[in-house]
Image: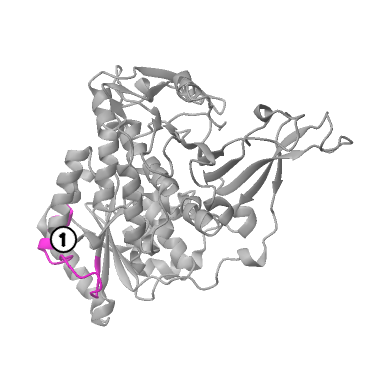
Amino acid sequence: MTQPVTFTNVTKPPSMTPPAAMLHGDPCTLVIFGAVGDLARRKLMPAVYYLAKKKLLADQFRVIGVGMDALDDEKYREQMRAALSNTDEVKDFDEAVWNDLAPRLTWVGGNLTEPAVYKALSAALAGIESPLPAYDRNRLFYLAVPPAIFATIVKHLADSEVCPRVLDASVRPWRRAVVEKPFGHDLASAKELSRVVLGSLAEHQVYRIDHYVGKETVQNVLVLRSANAIFETLWSREHVSHVEITAAETVGVEERARYYETSGVVRDMFQNHLLQLLALVAMEPPETPSADAIRDEKVKVLRAIRPLVTHGTTEAVRGQYAAGALKGKDVPAYRDEPGCAKTSETPTFAALHIALETERWRGVPFFLRSGKRMAKRWSEVVIHFRTPRKLMYEPVPTETLAPNRLSLRIQPDDGVSLSFEVKMPGAALALTPGIEVQEVKMDFSYADAFGTEVHPAYETLLLDCMIGDATLFTRTDEVEAAWAVIDPLISLWESGRGSPLTFYAAGSTGPAEADALLARSGFHWSPL
C-alpha cells in the first residue's frame, strides 16, 4: 500500500463556532499557596490571564498569592507580569488585559506551616470581602506546593476558620481547595492523606486536579461517543480489536530529579494521566450527566482492571533512557542527569498490557505506554477496529487491508482522525481482478476548525472550580482505585523482581521489549 492520503477540514462551519456566552465564574478570591513557584508562573497565572481576557471572571474576582518570599503587592505583580511575558502558554500578550488584572493581585508572606500566615491571610480576605454581600464571599484555595505539606495546609485552613469544613454543597459562600497530583506516593499514603484531608474538609470541597483531563480532546471522548451513534454502537469488543494510549515526551528529567528518583514513570504518568484516559475511554455511559454519575462509572472501570501482577509475573515493560540524540543535539543518559544516581533503577519508560473484566471490553487488550526523551512529544488514544469478516469481492484479501482506526490526538495538535479503505482511481471495476485499495484519513483539528489558539488546560479546570463542576476532578475512591491498580507492579519492580530494567536511546521510540509486548498479541504500536 502507498502512504495514507489525508483530507483535512480547514473550513469553520457555523455550527462549530464557539458559543458567545460561556459559563461565568462565581465571584471569588483565588488564594494560591506557592504563588511564585514554577506551577503558578507557568500554568496558573496564564490560565487566570486567559479567563480575564475572555471576560469569564467576575468583577469581584481577586487573587491572593501566599509564599515565603519577601514581597509586597507591587513586587508580586511585577513577578507575575514577567512570568506571563516569558511563558510559551501566552500568545500575543495584551497589555490592557494585564492592566485590568494586576490591581486584583495581593501578596501575603509567611511560612505555610505556621499559624501566623493564616491570620494574615484571614485579614487580607476580610479586607477584600468586606464590600461584598455575604453570598459572594467565595474562596478557592490552590495548593501549588509540594505534596508533603498538603495535609498541613488543609489542617491550618480548617483550624483557622479560613476554610472550614462545610457538609452541605449548596451552602454559599462556598469554600473549595484544589490539590495537585501526586495525591500520595502509594495506596497506603493516599489513604492516609485522604483521612487527614477529609478530616478537615468535606469531599465536595476537595478538587483533585489532573491537567490532562482539561485538554480539549480528553473532554471530547465522552462527547464523541454520546453525540455520534456511529461511534457508540461500535464502542465494544464486538468491533474493537485493541486500544492504544500513548503519552510520549521529548523532555528528560530536567530539574525534577529529586522528585523523579522516588517516583518514576509509573507513579508520575500512569497512576493519574493514563489511567484517567483509560477510564474515560472504557466507562459505560452514565445514567445522568452529573459529575458523580460520571465519576462512578470511571471508578467501575478501574476496579475492573485485571491484576497487573499474577504469581510474580506481569505483562509490562520498564525502561530507562540512555544517551542519544534528539532534535540534532546529544543528550545525556538519565543516570548522568544532575541529581540522578549513577546506578539508578528508576524507570523513565513503561508499557503495560491491561485487561478489563467487563462485558463491553472482555478480551480487548489496552496497551498503555509513556516515556521521557522519546522521538516526539505525542499523546493520543487510538481505537483499532476489527477487520471485515467478509468482503463483497474476492480480489482483495482481508489480511491486506489496514483496520479502521479512530485516533484522538491530545497533544500537541488536538484533534480527531479516522482512517478507512477506499478504491484507488483507475479503470478496474469493483468486481474484477486488479482492484487496488488505499487507506485514507479524514482529519479534524481544533485549531483548523475553530481558528483559535488552544488555551491552557488549567483555564478550563480553574473555571470549573469557580462554577462548582467537579466532573473533571478525581474523587477519593477513584484515586485509591488507581493506586490499587499500579501498587503491586511498583512493589514488584522495586523489589528487583519482574521484568528487568531495559535501556533505550534518547530520541528513540522506546525499548524493543515494548514492541515485543504488542507483537505477542499480533499488534504493533502506532508510529509517533
381 or 64: nearer the viewer: 381
Q: Main secondary structure of the magenta part?
A: loop
299 is within the stretch colored magenta: no
Asked which quadrant contains residue 440, the reply is top right
Q: In the image, which residues are magenta?
A: 152-175
Asked which quadrant contains residue 488, the reply is top left
170 is within the stretch colored magenta: yes
Give how far across and how far down residue 92 sits, in percent: 55, 57
Give how far across and how far down residue 413 sits, in percent: 56, 46
In the image, is residue 159 above or below residue 336? below
489 or 446: nearer the viewer: 489
Q: Which residue occupies 72% across, 28% down?
A: 1
Q: Residue furthest right?
A: 427
Give how far across and how far down residue 93 sits, in percent: 52, 59
Question: Crowding at label 1, few (<14), some or many (≥20) Cα neighbours within 10 Å?
Answer: many
* Residue 146 seen in render: no
Residue where numbered disc 1 is placed: 157
Q: Which residue occupies 20% across, 74% down?
A: 126
SS at badge 1: helix
Horizontally, residue 421 falls left or right of residue 270, namely right
* Type of amino acid under label 1: Leu
In the image, is residue 371 above or below residue 128? above
Give how far across and how far down residue 174 sits, in percent: 25, 70
In the image, is residue 173 above or below residue 346? below
The image quadrant where one finds the C terminus is: top right
Asked which quadrant contains residue 291, the reply is bottom left
